[in-house]
Structure formats: C-alpha cells, structure tokens
Image (cartoon, helix red, strand yellow):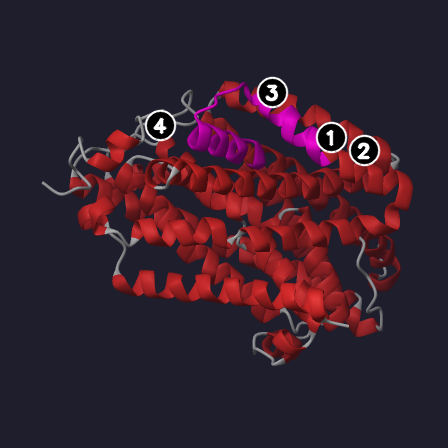
C-alpha cells in the first residue's frame, strides 16, 4: 500500500490528525455522476482567486500601468501562471496527505523552524489585511463620501459579515464570494469598454523587457504585482479549504479529487488574470496614454476616470468594484488566518476573536497613515504591503515544493517531475528578485 493511501503513515501520525476549519471540514458531499462530482469541487478556486485581485493588487497595477503603460503586463501574466502551478500543488498536498500546508510544516519541520514560518505567515496575513482595510475604506469614501479615517475604523465591523457567512454554510460563503467576483468583472468590463485600450500596446506588454531588472522603480512595482498575485496566505488557504470536500480514501478517488481541484483553481485564476490585466490596461489606457504617469492613489484614479473617459459612470464602476474586492478579501483572509493559526500552533479561537486580532493590528498603521500623513500616502502603504508579501512568499513556496516532490509523503500522488522542476524555477525567480530588491534598497541611490 502506498504512503499516500496508508492511514497510519508516520507523517500523518506526527500531525496529531487535527483539522483546521473543523466546522466545515469534509462538509460537502462528493457523489453522483462525474459531472456532479466535479461541480462539488467548484468553489475553493474562486475563494483563492479573490486574493489575487485585492485592493493591494489594484494599487500596484494602477501605479504600474500609469507609470510604465503596459510594460508590466508580462509580469501580471507570468505571476498568474506561477500562481496556477503553485495552487495546484497546494491542492495536491492537501488531498494527498489530508493536511493543509500549515499542518504539514508543523509535522515535518523542527518546532523552532515551524514557529518562524508561522510568524512569517502571520505577517503576510496582516499585510494582506492592511491592504483590505485601506481598500475597503477608500471604496466607502468614493461611493458614500465617508472620511477615510472613519472608513478605516468601520472596517472592523466586517468581522460580523464573516461570522454570518460561516454560520450559514461553506457553500453559501463560496456563493457570496463568486457573486461579488461577478460584480467586479462587470464593473471592469464596463471601464475597459470606455477606456478603449490599443491592441498593439497590449501585445507589446506581453513581451519581457530588460528594464524589469535594470530599473529599480520598475522592479519594485513588478515585485509588488508578484506579491499581490502569488500571495503566500493563498497557499495555506487553498490547502485548507479544499479539505471541506468529502474526499474518498482510495487512490483513484484522490487522483480524481486532485484533477477536479486543479481544474477548479486553474479556471478561477484565469478569471483573476483577466481582472488583474484589466486593472493594468485601464491605468495604461486612461492615464499613461494621456500623459498622467503619476497616478498611484486609488482616490486619484477615481477622480481622473470621469474627466479622462468622458463619463461619471467609469468612476462609479471603479468604486463599486473596489468595495466588492475589499469585502471579498475580508472573507478569504479570515479563513487563511484560521488555517494558519490552527495548523501551526493548534490554537483554535473563534473567527470573531481571530478577525479582531488581525484587523486590530492592521488598523494601527492604516489609521496612523491616514490621520497623520494624509490620504496621499495610502497608495504607497498599499504597494509596500504587497512588497512585504513578496518577501514572505519564499517561506511558503519552498516548503510546498519540497513536500509535493516527496514520494515518502505523497506516494503515488507525488507531483510530476516537470511540475517540481517548474516550481523550483519559480521559487528561484522569486528569491532572486527579492534579493535584488533588498540589495537595491540598501546600496542603491
């Protein structure tokens, strides 16, 4: 019997077999025809995709599109392709071992190493939450005129939204997220129609340029896009929520589950790529092409859309999509926080307490910046939060690649050699770019 199907393998014994999100674990039945079984797996990918289009992503894409036109479109596409592979590995790990990434790190690494990885994962979630606080507050300001500081403080109440959604069932939570994603897609489709981006510029943006490495400012924004796209907390999130499905114990059932989960996340992330690309193309067509290369704030983008595109509808659609992004990201960041805390340190607290802790930590810098430095610096804080995510990313990617390449852990469900090779290249690229960024920050002009 293979390691992947043997119920008493050493790896699972070391994990104490505790489950994260216990109230939702294996709560969704997978049965019936092949089509019905596949439909049962649709959902987790869209929760993951939410993290790939959060307000922090907006800030980096808007700044990049405004400053450099479509030049960073290549990075957005490359980041999404990286994400598709890494999220597939995340689902494979969960289905093959019955554990999420946090539980696997706790089981496999010495306690001191696991503790450091937990701290880094928590820092990444706080950085994500910071982006959501600012993004949601800006959305409230743009749509309802609420002062930014009050909007930041009001975001603390979103904990009740998360609690309500978790109580009504995981399927309804997924439906809520997908509904908001549809709203975001419609909003951006309308804005792109109004902006009328040039096809030649789009195709040119798909070609990599040497400036991506030689220009420190472009590299900084590129890493911000990378950190906002391939987000470390999403690897923990996906490996946890895919286990809400009732996955059979046999090898054929697990192989089918991996195929379905991979297809689900691939479709969802392709959708996220369209949204992310739309944000960058909107900035390139509406701002860069008209000589506005300095647009870095979400409020500034909202104010300029109407006069530059000739209709106030573009600005309203922008605000609606931003608020929807902030609400969606709130749900997924809370789930990721639960998975990380329960998996790494076996500490189970209520979703309300968990949300209040991370949101409280994120509120401090957000409120301080908006109250002291003013609204003009919120965009810079958003971009900085995404660079933090990029710096934290290797500490989630490297363990994931290592685990899924281990036949001892996954048996016949081990990742294919080509998947492992590509994942190693991705990890090397991420580490190299981060080292270059740190070097430029210390020794640059």
In this view, 435 is above or below 386: below
Magenta-drawn stretch contains 132: no
Between discs 4 and 3, the one toward the N terminus? 4
Find disc 2 in the rendering and name its residue: 151
Between discs 1 and 3, the one toward the N terminus? 1
Between discs 2 and 3, the one toward the N terminus? 2
Q: Nearer the viewer, residue 151 or 113?
A: 113
Residues rendered magenta in the picture: 333-362
Main SS of residues in magenta: helix
Element carrying mark 1: helix
Find disc 3 in the rendering and name its residue: 352
Q: Nearer the viewer, residue 216 or 332?
A: 216
Q: CA distance from mark 1 to mark 2?
A: 6 Å
Which labelled disc corresponds to residue 155? 1
* Residue at 39%, 61% in the rendered image: 423
How far across and down, in percent of the image, does residue 135 sit? 73, 43
| Residue depth check, mark 4 versus mark 1: number of the one nearer the observer | 1
* Residue at 28%, 31% in the rendered image: 14
Q: Is residue 180 visible?
A: yes
How far across and down, in percent of the image, does residue 358 sit? 64, 31
In this view, 312 is above or below 150: below
Q: CA distance from mark 1 to mark 3?
A: 13 Å
Contact (Cβ within 8 Å) of mark 2 with mark 3: no
Contact (Cβ within 8 Å) of mark 1 with mark 2: yes
């Amino acid at each position: 019997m293979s390691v992947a199907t043997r119920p008493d393998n050493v790896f699972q014994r070391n994990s104490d077999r505790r489950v994260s999100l216990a109230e939702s674990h294996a709560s969704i039945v997978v049965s019936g025809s092949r089509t019905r079984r596949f439909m049962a797996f649709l959902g987790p990918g869209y929760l993951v995709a939410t993290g790939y289009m959060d307000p922090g992503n907006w800030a980096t894409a808007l700044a990049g599109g405004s400053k450099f036109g479509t030049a960073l479109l290549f990075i957005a596409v490359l980041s999404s392709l990286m994400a598709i592979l890494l999220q597939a590995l995340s689902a494979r790990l969960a289905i093959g071992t019955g554990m999420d990434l946090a539980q696997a790190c706790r089981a496999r690494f010495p306690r001191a190493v696991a503790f450091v990885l937990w701290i880094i994962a928590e820092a990444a979630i706080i950085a994500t939450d910071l982006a959501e606080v600012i993004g949601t507050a800006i959305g409230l300001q743009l749509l309802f005129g609420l002062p930014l500081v009050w909007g930041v403080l009001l975001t603390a109440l979103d904990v009740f939204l998360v609690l309500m959604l978790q109580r009504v069932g995981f399927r309804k939570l997924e439906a809520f997220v997908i509904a908001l994603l549809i709203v975001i897609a419609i909003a951006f489709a309308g804005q792109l129609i109004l902006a009328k981006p040039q096809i030649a510029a789009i195709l040119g943006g798909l070609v990599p340029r040497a400036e991506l490495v030689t220009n420190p400012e472009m590299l900084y924004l590129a890493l911000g896009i990378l950190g906002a796209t391939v987000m470390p907390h999403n690897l923990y999130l996906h490996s946890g929520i895919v286990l809400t499905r009732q996955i059979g114990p046999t090898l054929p059932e697990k192989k089918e589950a991996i195929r379905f989960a991979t297809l689900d996340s691939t479709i969802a992330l392709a959708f996220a790529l369209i949204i992310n690309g739309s944000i960058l193309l909107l900035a390139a067509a509406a701002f860069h092409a008209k000589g506005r290369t300095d647009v870095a704030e979400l409020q500034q983008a909202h104010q300029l859309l109407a006069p530059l595109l000739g209709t106030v509808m573009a600005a309203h659609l922008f605000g609606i999509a931003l608020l929807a992004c902030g609400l969606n990201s709130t749900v997924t960041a809370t789930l990721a926080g639960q998975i990380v805390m329960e998996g790494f340190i076996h500490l189970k607290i209520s979703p309300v307490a968990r949300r209040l802790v991370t949101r409280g930590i994120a509120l401090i810098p957000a409120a301080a910046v908006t109250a002291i430095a003013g609204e003009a610096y919120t965009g810079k804080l958003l971009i900085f939060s995404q660079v933090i995510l990029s710096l934290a990313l290797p500490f989630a990617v490297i363990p994931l690649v290592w685990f899924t390449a281990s036949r001892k852990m996954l048996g016949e469900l081990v990742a294919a050699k080509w998947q492992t090779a590509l994942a190693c290249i991705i990890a090397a690229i991420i580490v190299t770019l981060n080292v270059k960024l740190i070097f430029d920050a210390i020794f640059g002009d």
